Amino acid sequence: TLPSVVDVPRYMLKQQDADAPFRIGWIGSPVTAPYLDVIGNALNILSREAKIHIVLIGAGNSNPFPELPTTRLDWSEDQELSIGETFDVGVMPLVDGPFEGGKCGYKLVQYMAGGLPVIASPVGINTQIITPGINGYLAASTDEWLESLRRLIDDRELRFKMGQMGRRRAEQMYNLRITAPK
């Protein structure tokens, strides 16, 4: 089988911005926006501890975090290719159900192509895309989401290293230019 792939070189890499709030990013659609409820409690707690900003691409009019600073952006190819400049971490919360177990982890591949660390629910292929502690974290509970986010907020160097490892993994395993000839 062939994995889901992206054209990795087209993705802009993460630029370090020390003074900005920590940007927790998500790409999806209005149909998948309800999965964001999985991380709502963690984000509410985290917002009392740190300066965070939520960035949602493609969520439509949905605003699952009305009490948190949130930017909702319409999906576009340019928006997608610039996530490395827009987010500090890419998240993929899911519930553990049969449909979700069959999802392809595409947004994780996109985040990694942008040089971002990732955090996802340990559902389906996510457990193969993420190597915990290397390119991101798997989080199954509010406490695990909080712990993972805190680590990344507190350690800019860790974010950078995980982002580099994710980009390398995307280049080697989820790259259109390598997979297409196969």
Image (spheres, rainbow, N blue to C red):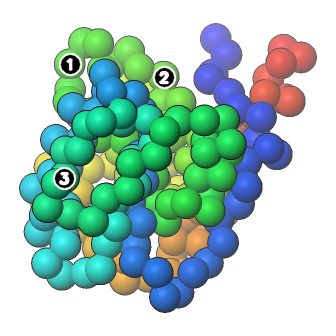
Q: Earlier in the sequence, mark 3 or mark 2?
A: 3
Q: Is residue 147 left or right of residue 174?
A: left
Q: Residue at x 19, y 45 (%)?
A: 64
Identified at 61% across, 45% down, the residue is 79
- Residue shown at 86% from the left, 30% from the top: 177
Spot occupied by residue 57 in the image (x, y as percentages of width and height): 45, 42
Where in the figure is residue 49, as x and y percent of width and height?
Answer: 18, 81
Q: Is residue 57 left or right of residue 138?
A: right
N-term-proximal mark, 3 vs 1? 3
Quadrant in which residue 100 is drawn:
top left
Residue 104's tag is: 2
Relative image position of residue 155 (x, y in whole percent): 44, 82
Quarter of the N terminus within the rendering: top right
Q: Residue at x 59, y 72 (%)?
A: 160
Q: Which residue is mark 1?
A: 97
Q: Is residue 126 toward the left or the right of residue 5 in the image? A: left
Residue named by callout 3: 65
Q: Amino acid at mark 1?
A: Gly
Tell me the mark number nearer the camera, choosing from 3 and 2: 3
How far apart marks 3 and 2 lie (CA) works out to 26 Å
Labels 1 and 2: the sequence-earlier one? 1
Element class at badge 2? loop
> Looking at the image, is mark 3 or mark 1 nearer the viewer?
3
Residue at disc 1, secondary structure: loop
In front of the other: 12 or 161: 12
Q: How far is the residue under mark 3 from the one under mark 1?
A: 23 Å
